[in-house]
Amino acid sequence: MKTTKSQKRISRHNRVRAKIKGDTARPRVAIYKSNKFTYAQVIDDATGKTLIAISDYAGKKGKSAKGTKTEKASLNGKALSEALKKKGIDAVVFDRGGFKYHGRVKALAEGLREAGIKL
């Protein structure tokens, strides 16, 4: 049986998730990217709750930012870091979700770093 591209990504994600855990002091930032949008969630694995969720998807009638997908991902990283600082969090564990650390994933991580969040 052939494995699809998405099945391989999920398998890589499970391998990474076996090694990293987020807690209250240092939650996990989980990334997902579809063909159109980039999503990020800040998750406290100790309680199993999502603390913050952000994406460049603005809904059916919302206005989304202009620019390339990579530029939008970078803006997401900066916006996420502001939300983290409001909650008093200055360090996170980065979960790339089985994607390569490149392109949009890297741009989001760099956006977090630029705003002062430790990965």
Image (spheres, rainbow, N blue to C red):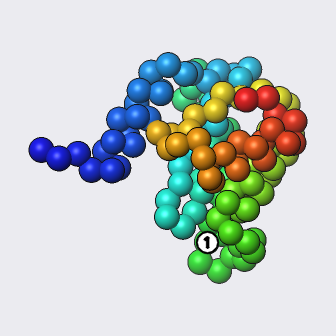
The structure residue drawn at horizontal position 62% and vertical position 52%, both measured from the top left corner, is 103
The structure residue drawn at horizontal position 70% and vertical position 50%, both measured from the top left corner, is 107
Please say whether residue 54 is visible from this viewpoint.
yes
| Residue nearest the viewer, comparing 42 with 46 | 42
Counting from the top left corner in percent of width and height, residue 53 is at 65, 48
Position of 111 compared to 40: left or right?
Answer: right
The structure residue drawn at horizontal position 59% and vertical position 78%, both measured from the top left corner, is 60
Image quarter in which the C terminus is found: top right
Position of 118 compared to 39: left or right?
Answer: right
Please say whether residue 50 is visible from this viewpoint.
no
Q: Secondary structure at mark 1?
A: loop
Instruction: Tell me the quarter of the picture where residue 117 sits.
Output: top right
| Residue nearest the viewer, comparing 9 with 56 | 9
The structure residue drawn at horizontal position 31% and vertical position 45%, both measured from the top left corner, is 7
Instruction: Tell me the quarter of the picture where residue 44 sits.
Output: top right
Farthest front residue? Answer: 102
| Residue nearest the viewer, comparing 93 with 52 | 93
Image quarter in which the N terminus is found: top left
In the image, residue 60 above or below residue 98: below
Residue receiving disc 1: 59
Counting from the top left corner in percent of width and height, residue 101 is at 59, 41
Position of 20 compared to 6: left or right?
Answer: right
Identify which amino acid the numbered label 1 is placed on.
Gly
Counting from the top left corner in percent of width and height, residue 90 is at 83, 29
In the image, residue 70 above or below residue 86: below
Position of 44 compared to 91: left or right?
Answer: left
Counting from the top left corner in percent of width and height, residue 38 is at 60, 57
Farthest bottom residue? Answer: 61
Farthest left residue? Answer: 1
Instruction: Tell me the quarter of the picture where residue 14 sits.
Output: top left
Disc 1 packing (10 Å; few <14; some 14–19; many ≥20): few
